[in-house]
Amino acid sequence: MGSAFKKFCMQFCCCCCCADDDDEEDEKQPLVSPDPLDYFTREVQKRRDEETNLWSEPGDPSHSEREDDRTLHSLIQARSKTRMGSTGYRRLSVDIEAMRDVRREVREKWKTILENLGFMAEADSLLTVSAGASHDRMRNAPAARAMLQTLHSETSIFCSREPPPERYLFILDRLIYLDIAEDFLAKARRFYPPTDESDEETPGLAINLPLLLARVEAMNGAPDDDESERDLSD
């Protein structure tokens, strides 16, 4: 009995000593906490990317739900894997900027109308849509969608050959909440009346999405710049 108790005490003391050693080791280890600066840097970069690319589906982090978002995302990804300064890199940059210019042009039309309505200081914030935009948070989703379709069919704000970008659904929801949506629609009809498809300006490369995707595939499959250049010029 005494020897068993003694053995138990020795084992207990050994465990305690090991635990104390582990505690001391833990105390020696520095506490690693996420750097808030890194978080804010990532958030700033995310917002900058959002404003640069103006995703048609801002709530889709994969950028794969709409064909135009998928094309732009594929171009950006392909460029990131291409040697900077190469022929392929420059060609991809031209295509990316062409698509971005189309989107910026649409945004500028909205900004022009808002500023004409007296929202000079508020226009940029009203037109900002974050990646966290959710249809569940909308206050007037049905009315906003109906108005978006009206803008698409009765004005030349958007390209008539493509469905209107979903990002403007969230903006219209704000305008309805602020009770200025009808005024916005009236101004849009006056500033940007509908045009015949034959008279409509070709919106950059936005109507050539399959061609751009084919170009990305050609870039990814080309072993070098010279061969890529030959393939794309054929």
Image (tube, grey):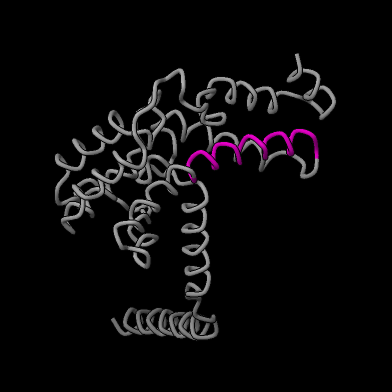
Q: Which residue occupies 45% across, 49% down?
A: 108
Camera-side residue: 73 or 104? 104
Residue 51 is situated, as x and y percent measured from the top left of the image, at 48, 53
Residue 49 is situated, as x and y percent measured from the top left of the image, at 51, 53
Q: Quadrant of residue 219?
A: top right
Residue most extreme to the right? 226
Q: Which residue occupies 41% across, 85% down?
A: 13
How many marks do you count on the picture? 0
Q: Could you tell whether 156 is left or right of 74 in the image?
A: left
Q: Which residue occupies 34% across, 51% down?
A: 113
Residue 81 is situated, as x and y percent measured from the top left of the image, at 69, 40
Q: Which residue occupies 46% across, 83% down?
A: 23
Q: What predominant SS class does the magenta segment belong to?
A: helix
Q: Is residue 194 above or below residue 128?
A: above
Camera-side residue: 147 or 39? 147
Which residues lie in the magenta part? Answer: 86-104
* Magenta-colored stretch includes residue 174: no
Camera-side residue: 134 or 120? 120
Q: Quadrant of residue 8?
A: bottom left
Q: Is residue 209 above or below residue 157?
A: above
Placement of the C terminus among the 4 image quadrants: top right
Q: Could you tell whether 98 is left or right of 231 in the image?
A: left
Residue 160 is situated, as x and y percent measured from the top left of the image, at 38, 26
Q: Is residue 193 above or below residue 184?
A: above
Q: Quadrant of residue 208?
A: top right
Q: Is residue 164 above or below residue 17?
A: above
Residue most extreme to the top? 234
